Amino acid sequence: MGQKQWILTEWEFRACGDEQWLPATVPGTVHTDLLRSGLIEQPFYGINEHGLQWIDKKDWEYRTCIRLEEDWSEVEEIQLHFAGLDTYADVYINQMHALSADNMFRAWDIPAKELLRAGDNEILVRFRSPVKEDLPKLKALGYSLPAPNDQSELGGLEEQRISVFARKAPYHYGWDWGPRFVTSGIWREVRLTGRNGVNIADLYIRQDAVSEAQARLTAVVEVDAPAAWEGTLKIAADGQEWRQEVKVEAGKQTLKVELVIDRPRLWWCNGLGKPELTSFQAELLSDGSVLSAQEVTTGLREIKLITGPDERGAAFYFELNGVNVFAKGANHIPNDSFIPEVDEERYRHEIITAVESHMNMLRVWGGGFYEEETFYRLCDEHGLLVWQDFMFACSMYPGDEAFLESVREEAAYNIRRLRNHPSIALWCGNNEIDSAWAHYQEDKGWGWKKDYGADLRAQLWADYEAVFHRILPEEVAAHHPGMAYWPSSPLRALTGDDNQHSTQVTGEGDIHYWGVWHGIEPFENYNVKVGRFMSEYGFQSFPELKSVMSYATEQDLELESEIMLAHQKNGRGNQLIKEYMDMYLPQPKDFKAFLYMSQILQAEAIRMAIESHRRNKPYCMGTLYWQMNDCWPVASWASMDYYGRWKALQYTVRRSFGDLLLSADDTDGESLHIHAVSDLREALEGELVLRLHDFGGALLKEERRPVTLAADSAAVVLTLPLAELLDGRAAGETVLSLSLLADGREPETKLHFFAPAKEIVLKQPELTVTEVGGSGGTSFTVSTDVLARGVHLTVEEEGYFSDNFFDLLPGEPKTVEFRLRTGGADHFRPAAPTGLEVHSMADYIVEG
């Protein structure tokens, strides 16, 4: 026998002390197993979250039985592999204690040969309550560590915030967009493997130097041999083959083979080229027979983080294969409170949505978990760069030896697990801890330091430095050489003095700008608060009515109802939406209209931010809004809701992230500045067309100007005095249509209004929807008799339109195509929808 393997999926579970065993799903969680057994109500409905906090106070156990044939006794090595245990777990094999696990973020292996027998074997996993496990740690420490997003009060723990002690997904304890479900369970697969002889344990293709001319690589092959062995190591890729005679001793060792590929097929991110992937096969051969083999797929590319000083401070941008990348994307959080519920289709929906929205980067935020293999594989295949946080966020952490060693093992495991993915662009130590603590600036940060004396402050900072300035960079350097490490986001620079970090927008580092929203600053501040790389900013909205009705009833449809507040985790979030809406938009006629208007508001805020960031290229070289997705149905910053339904923001992002962008700015009150941004790698000759209309569609003025856009550029292509442009016409009754025409490209268009939406009086438009002949009912042309704002198409099926939530002028009809969410490999495909309805803002606001 060479190798024999079982995936263990038949499990049952119970609360420790109960008599009855119930069917369990593995991978899974206690919460979802209880739900499937009918023992709890749907966790996301109403306020059910509040009544399910007892689950994390109990111990739980899972068991399975595996029957082995007699020939297993002849196997040289048998290993029981747990890819993920959440979190404090003891494993017993035939009632013998085999493992104590304490970290959700890593795999656990048990040498099991001496514990197994021919016939039936029981494997039992007992999970200790993370609450009962960690409360004593807090007591022993003698003081609390900052963890403001830990919803301990909801969990019945008052102010005892214990999330920092567990190496477990921080968002499980609650966040300002997510519920508190502190899960337990076998959350990744379990497999039993038996093998004889030498084995390839790991294959890493280290990319030493990659260019269009040549890729110089090293195949790093980890071998596990039960006894001394000699033979041939063969590496194959893209029709080439490399052989090396090798001798190995008993145990584990590393072999290296240098590889050279001329004129390699390079991996590019979305918008810059094709994300070419290359498969590498490693084989151990003896007399021509394959004793062990492993294959990995990667993309050949060179990715760098550029942070050197320049005339305006210090740069912060990514360079891919020698090309400067303006990062366009979003922050990614877990797609569900219960991680194993997310299947490949849901991951594909998110990644394809990002690609369809012209993104090239997602940031895996540090309060979730190191994502599933499927996520990274899809990012590889579709050309999405990944900014990868380690799993630390918005808290200070303990610094005892056991904790630090657990962090080191977690880091090594995940770096090694993900390092072959070409999508990985950066390892980042944590989310917002440096700027929250602000060690070198007494009057900065989130106010945490005031609760501690000088000696304790020094200790907490030393513990911080041990993790983020020593352990994590050491592990990145050891296991993913050449990959950039950034200690915290946001961060100016790592200088070890009072210039190290800042919550202010500065000329270096990356920025989280939350003046809009948390600071209740006006949207217009997005035009002036621009940093070198905007890695977080955002604005909230509600999901659509269909999604709201998944957790509420008609009686709950009120801004301050118990249910609406339970599904708004950001304190005054609902009121903030209303306050901003009073500032910028007409008054919605009822709560259902408020849902729609909140999405219009969110989209307008982030549109202003993205356009400002892109206009300031190359000073600013990245814009990642908060956030892409949701982990449950909720009012939040997401651009698509928990069910994957696109909000108005997702459509606005799709328009705003295109290769070409027109942006008009008249905030100085004197002139209209028309900006053109190009992410193309070649210059573009085109024509700028300006048409001034009244709201009835009458053409008041038209101008055409030739424009030349340099490759990868942003520039003001035209400035016009407002008084001359309007020529006495009322700002609140006039709109400018802008179009950039270039041969062979869809025109980039933009409507610019000279008055705030709140001051524009909208007439009720007559919207006409006509099926496009020959489209098979998949495409429609929408037209109007007067200005229609926020035109919103809805259908019964799940999917998206090629455009939606758009403004429409008479005489300028728009054709859109419906794309069905198929659930298959194609994911989105044109389809004929049913129940098509069309509305505009005028349908949702108070008249007059």
Image (spheres, rainbow, N blue to C red):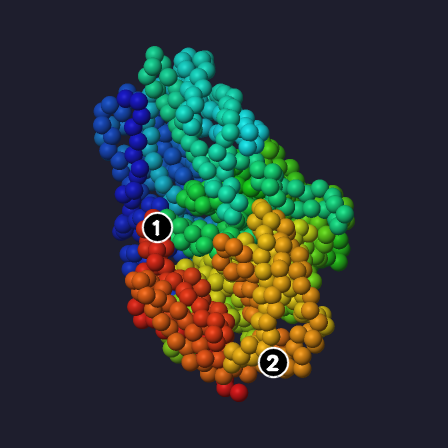
- Amino acid type indicated by mark 2: Gly
Instruction: Name the residue tied to disc 2.
Output: 732
Question: Circle 1: is it few (<14), some (14-19), or many (20+) Cα within 10 Å?
Answer: few
User: Front-most of 250 and 309?
Assistant: 309
Q: Is residue 496 left or right of residue 602?
A: right
Q: Is residue 708 something one can see in this rendering?
A: yes
Which residue is painted at 69% across and 75% down in the image? 724
Which residue is painted at 46% across and 83% down in the image? 764
Q: Which structural element holds mark 2?
A: helix
What is the CA distance from the residue labelled 2 to the residue labelled 1? 45 Å
Q: Which structural element holds mark 1?
A: loop
In which image quadrant can residue 830 be found? Answer: bottom left
**Residue 719 locus on image (x, y percent):** 69, 66
Depicted 27 relative to depicted 174: above or below? above
- State if disc 1 and disc 2 touch (CB < 8 Å): no
- Amino acid type indicated by mark 1: Asp
Depicted 38 relative to depicted 729: above or below? above
Which residue is painted at 30% across and 49% down in the image? 24
Question: Circle 2: is it few (<14), some (14-19), or many (20+) Cα within 10 Å?
Answer: some
